[in-house]
Image (tube, helix red, strand yellow):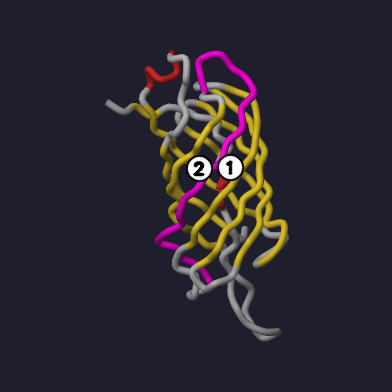
């Protein structure tokens, strides 16, 4: 049975939260924040345990159901990596993510995460590419087998999902 469990996998989206704004020239209206669903899997090394410790992670996932001022962005793919400290109950990380949007454009994001319980809050800035300088954020819920926190390997590959807002 799966139980929601916080995993400080600084995934960002990781993650992968990126800017979704309008296309156009000088006459384009200001862009509105965009919202997507972010879903993926983190790979954590070493695995998270009850006792806090240093770890690194990679992440891959997708943005779906994107709604915002740029109608050409419907979805995206994201990959990220980073590191931090923590365990199964709380964590803090920093990382970098790369997003490729459905319209062919890309965004690079720097971010930090704070994990508590089953929730991982991601806050970032689009550092280059599409929508550079705009904010990105997400609230992700991680799922894993809770007893893995007490094993030698720890939690190594949790899945996650949650809302992401970009271009704020």
Describe the element under mark 2 as helix, strand or loop: strand
Q: Which image quarter is the N terminus in? A: top left
Mark 1 or mark 2: name the one nearer the start of the chain. Answer: 1
Front in this rendered view, residue 66 or 40: 40
Where 35 sits versus 14, above or below? below
Front in this rendered view, residue 4 or 32: 4
| Residue annotated with mark 2 | 139
Q: Position of residue 20 (x, y in %)?
A: 56, 65
Q: Which image quarter is the C terminus in? A: bottom right
Q: Give the range drawn in magenta.
A: 48-69
User: Which residue is at 70% across, 84% downward?
Assistant: 26
The quarter of the picture where residue 22 lies is bottom right
Where 67 sits versus 154, above or below? below
Report the magenta stretch's main SS. strand
Task: Give the distance between the C-alpha atoms of the residues marked 1 and 2, in whole angstroms.
Answer: 6 Å
User: Which residue is at 68% across, 49% downward?
Assistant: 110
| Residue annotated with mark 1 | 122
Residue 166 part of the magenta-drawn span? no
Front in this rendered view, residue 54 or 91: 54
Mark 1 and mark 2 residues within 8 Å of each other at the beta carbon: yes
Describe the element under mark 1 as helix, strand or loop: strand
Where 100 sits versus 52, above or below? below
């Amino acid at each position: 049975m799966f139980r929601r469990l916080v995993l400080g996998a600084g995934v960002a989206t990781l993650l992968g939260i990126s800017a979704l704004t309008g296309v156009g020239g000088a006459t384009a209206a200001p862009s509105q924040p965009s919202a997507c669903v972010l879903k993926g899997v983190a790979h954590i090394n070493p695995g998270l345990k009850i006792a806090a410790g240093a770890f690194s992670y990679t992440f891959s996932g997708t943005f779906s159901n994107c709604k915002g001022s740029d109608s050409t962005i419907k979805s995206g793919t994201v990959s990220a990596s980073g590191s931090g400290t923590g365990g199964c109950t709380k964590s803090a990380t920093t990382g970098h993510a790369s997003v490729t949007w459905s319209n062919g454009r890309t965004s690079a994001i720097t971010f930090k995460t704070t994990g508590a319980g089953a929730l991982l809050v991601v806050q970032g800035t689009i550092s280059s590419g599409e929508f550079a300088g705009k904010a990105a954020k997400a609230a992700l819920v991680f799922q894993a087998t809770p007893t893995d926190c007490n094993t030698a390997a720890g939690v190594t590959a949790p899945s996650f999902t949650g809302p992401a807002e970009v271009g704020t």
